C-alpha cells in the first residue's frame, strides 16, 4: 500500500501544470466550439491581434456595456482586422448560460434593449475550461493578445465600474493605441469588475 501511495504521489507531482495567463508571455492556447458548432482555436488567428471578452447576458454590468459601447468596439476591431472572441463560461443552470440558438439571437440583436453585436465568434464554454485556463473572474473580463500571440492586457474593460462607459477611460482601447504606437501597454493589468463568472462550482 505504501508503494502505491508513493507512486500516486509521484505521478501527481509529475503532472504538467495548466498554462496560466501571464502578461508579456504567450497567451494560453485553446480550442472551443462556437455557436454554430465550429471549432475555434486561438491559433486560427495567428498574425492577428485577438480580444477575448468574457460575457454573461444576465449580468447588469454586461447589459450596461451592450447598450451600444461594446458593439462599437467590436466594429472598430473588425475594421482593424482584430479578432474579437466573446466567450460564455456560464455553467448549465447558472446565470448567463445559453444554448447556441439563444446566443445567436442575442448576438443578432433580437433581444429587447440589446443592439446587434459584432464579434468574430461566440464561444460556448459551459464546462469552464477556457475560463479557468485564463482565470477569467468577471463578466466582462477582457484580454488582449498581440500578433505574436503574446498576452498584452488582462483586466477590466475600463476604469468606471459604476459610471457611464462613454465617460470612462477604456483600458482595452488604450492598450490597442499603445501597441499601434509601438509603446508598452500601461496599465497592462487591472482588476476586472462585473458579475462573477458562473462556473459550475461557483
Image (cartoon, rainbow, N blue to C red):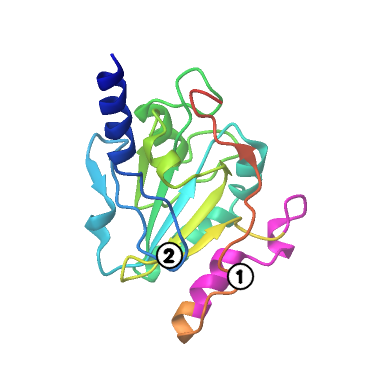
Is 197 on the left or on the right of 125, as rendered?
right
Q: Which of the two residues, 111 or 160, is positioned nearer the viewer here?
A: 160
- Look at the picture and state if 172 lies above or below 94: below
Quarter placement of the C terminus: top right
Q: Quadrant of residue 69?
A: bottom right
Q: Is residue 124 above or below residue 41?
A: above
Q: Nearer the viewer, residue 43 or 20?
A: 20
Badge 2: residue crowd in 10 Å (few <14, some 14–19, many ≥20): many
Q: Is residue 108 visible?
A: no
Residue placed under numbered mark 1 in the picture: 187
Query: Viewed as shown, does residue 79 lie left or right of 153?
Result: left
Q: In the image, what residue occupies the spot 77% across and 50% down?
A: 162
Between marks 2 and 1 in the image, the one whose residue lies nearer the viewer: 1
Element class at badge 2: helix
- Residue numbers of the magenta segment: 160-178
Location of mark 2 (residue): 77
The answer to whether the residues at label 2 and label 1 have Cβ atoms under 8 Å apart is no
Q: Residue furthest front?
A: 2
Position of residue 34 measured from the top left corner of the image (x, y, whole percent): 30, 39
Q: Residue furthest top?
A: 1
Q: Is residue 176 magenta?
A: yes
Q: Quadrant of residue 11?
A: top left
Amino acid at each position: 500500500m505504501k508503494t502505491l501511495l508513493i507512486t500516486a504521489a509521484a505521478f501527481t507531482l509529475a503532472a504538467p501544470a495548466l498554462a496560466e495567463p501571464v502578461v508579456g508571455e504567450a497567451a494560453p492556447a485553446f480550442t472551443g466550439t462556437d455557436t454554430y458548432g465550429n471549432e475555434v482555436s486561438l491559433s486560427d488567428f495567428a498574425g492577428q491581434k485577438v480580444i477575448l471578452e468574457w460575457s454573461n447576458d444576465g449580468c447588469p454590468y454586461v447589459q450596461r456595456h451592450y447598450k451600444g459601447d461594446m458593439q462599437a468596439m467590436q466594429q472598430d476591431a473588425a475594421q482593424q482586422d482584430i479578432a474579437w472572441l466573446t466567450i460564455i463560461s456560464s455553467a448549465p443552470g447558472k446565470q448567463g448560460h445559453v444554448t447556441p440558438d439563444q446566443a445567436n439571437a442575442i448576438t443578432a440583436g433580437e433581444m429587447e434593449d440589446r443592439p446587434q453585436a459584432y464579434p468574430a465568434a461566440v464561444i460556448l464554454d459551459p464546462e469552464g475550461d477556457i475560463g479557468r485556463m485564463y482565470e477569467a473572474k468577471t463578466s466582462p473580463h477582457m484580454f488582449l493578445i498581440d500578433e505574436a500571440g503574446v498576452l498584452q492586457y488582462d483586466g477590466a474593460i475600463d476604469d468606471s465600474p459604476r459610471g457611464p462607459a462613454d465617460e470612462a477611460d477604456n483600458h482595452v482601447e488604450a492598450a490597442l493605441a499603445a501597441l499601434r504606437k509601438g509603446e508598452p501597454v500601461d496599465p497592462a493589468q487591472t482588476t476586472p469588475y462585473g458579475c462573477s463568472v458562473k462556473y459550475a462550482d461557483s
